[in-house]
Amino acid sequence: MMDKERAARTDIPTLQWFPGHMKKAQRLIEENLKLVDVVIELLDARIPASSANPMLAEIIKDKPRLIALNKADLADSQSTKKWLAYFRAQGIPAVAIDSMKGKGMKQLVKEAEELARPKTEKFVAKGARARAARCMILGIPNVGKSSLINRLAGAVKAKAANQPGVTRAKQWIKIGSNLDLLDTPGILWPKFEDQTVGLKLAFTGAINDDIYDREQVTALLLAAMRRDYPERLVERFKFKGEMPTDGLELLEAVGRKRGCLVKGGVVDLEKAQNIVLTEFRAGKLGLVTLDEVPAAEAAEEEAEKNIE
Ligand SMILES: Nc1nc2c(ncn2[C@@H]2O[C@H](COP(=O)(O)OP(=O)(O)OP(=O)(O)O)[C@@H](O)[C@H]2O)c(=O)[nH]1
Ligand SMILES: [Mg+2]
C-alpha cells in the first residue's frame, strides 16, 4: 500500500457505528444467542457503566446473563467491590477478572455453570443425556473478549478475528467438562453519543481517540484525575507545591516535567499527550475507576424494576 493511501486510511476513525453496522452486529448476536444457555457480558472494570451497551437487555431478552468486570487489574479495587455488589443486588451474578493474568477464571466458570443449571437440568429431566452448559461472550470493542476466550481455552485457540465472508461451522471451546464456550464473541457497539461516556471510552482506549481531538481528550483526562485522584498525578509526575487545575495547563506541566520540549522551550503537546494516554491506559497513573456506582436510591429502583 502506498504511504499516502495508508495515511488516508488511518485518518478515518477505525470505529464508527452506523445503523447498518449495528443491525448486522445485533443479527449476529441474535443468531448465536439461540445456541447458548448463558451470556457473559464483559465490561471494563474501570468504566462499568460507560462500557455497557444499554440495549443489551433488549437484545438478549430473558437469556440468563452474568457480568464479568475485566481489566480489574487496572481498576480501583474498592470501586470494583462496590460495582460487584451493585450488580448482585439486582440479581445479576458478577465477578471481577483479569484476562491477562487469568485471575477470576475459576469463579467465572463456576458462575456460568450455575446460571445454566436450570436449563441443563431440564434437559436431563426430559430424559436426554446431560450436556455441558453453553455460553458466549458479549462486549464492546477492546474490552478483552478475545483475551478472555484465549485465557479460558488455556491456549491461543480463538482465532483473532471473525473473518467476514468466511462461513464456517460454529466452533465450541471446551472449558472443563461442564462448560462449552462459543469461540466467536458478540461485538456490542459502544454508546458514545453521550459526551461523557464517549470521553471515558476514549480515555480507556475502547474507541479510537482520533474520533476526538486528542489534546482535548488528554486535557479532560488530566482534569478528571486532578479532581478525583490528585495524589496520583503528584506521585507520577512529581508535582511539587501547586498543581494546575486546568487540564491544558496540566498537560503542559506534564510535558515540561518529562522534557517534551521543542525549540524555544515550547512544550511538544503531542508527545505529552502520548505519555499521558499511554501511561494512564497501562495503569501507571494508578488504579482508577471512572464510573461511580449509582446512588443507593437509584440502585433500589433498578432492583425493583428487575423484580417486576
Ligand atoms: N491490563 C489488562 N489488559 C487486558 C485485559 N484483557 C485484555 N487486555 C488488553 O486489552 C486489549 C484488547 O484486548 P482484546 O482481547 O483484543 O479485546 P477484544 O474485546 O477482543 O477486542 P476486539 O476484537 O477489537 O473487539 C489488549 O491490548 C489486551 O492485552 C485485562 O484483564 N487486563
Ligand atoms: Mg477480539
Image (cartoon, rainbow, N blue to C red):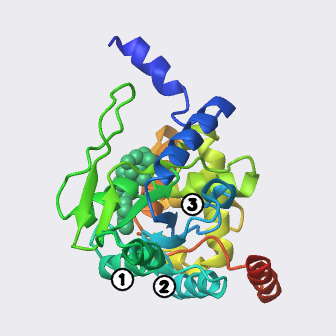
Query: Which of the marked residues, 2 or 3, is nearer the chain's N terminus?
Result: 2
**Picture coordinates of residue 194, whole percent (x, y):** 75, 52
Is 124 displayed left or right of 291 in the figure? left
**Picture coordinates of residue 223, whole percent (x, y):** 67, 64
110, 1: nearer the viewer? 110
Q: Is mark 1 within 8 Å of ligand 1?
A: no
**Picture coordinates of residue 222, whole percent (x, y):** 61, 63
The kind of residue tagged 1 is: Gln
Is 177 displayed left or right of 203 in the figure? left
Callout 2: few (<14), some (14-19), or many (20+) C-alpha neighbours within 10 Å? Answer: some
Give me the C-alpha separation between circle 1 and circle 2: 17 Å
Q: Pointer 3: what residue?
A: 253
Which residue: 28% across, 48% down?
171
The kind of residue tagged 2 is: Ser
Q: Pointer 1: what residue?
A: 107
Q: Pointer 2: what residue?
A: 77
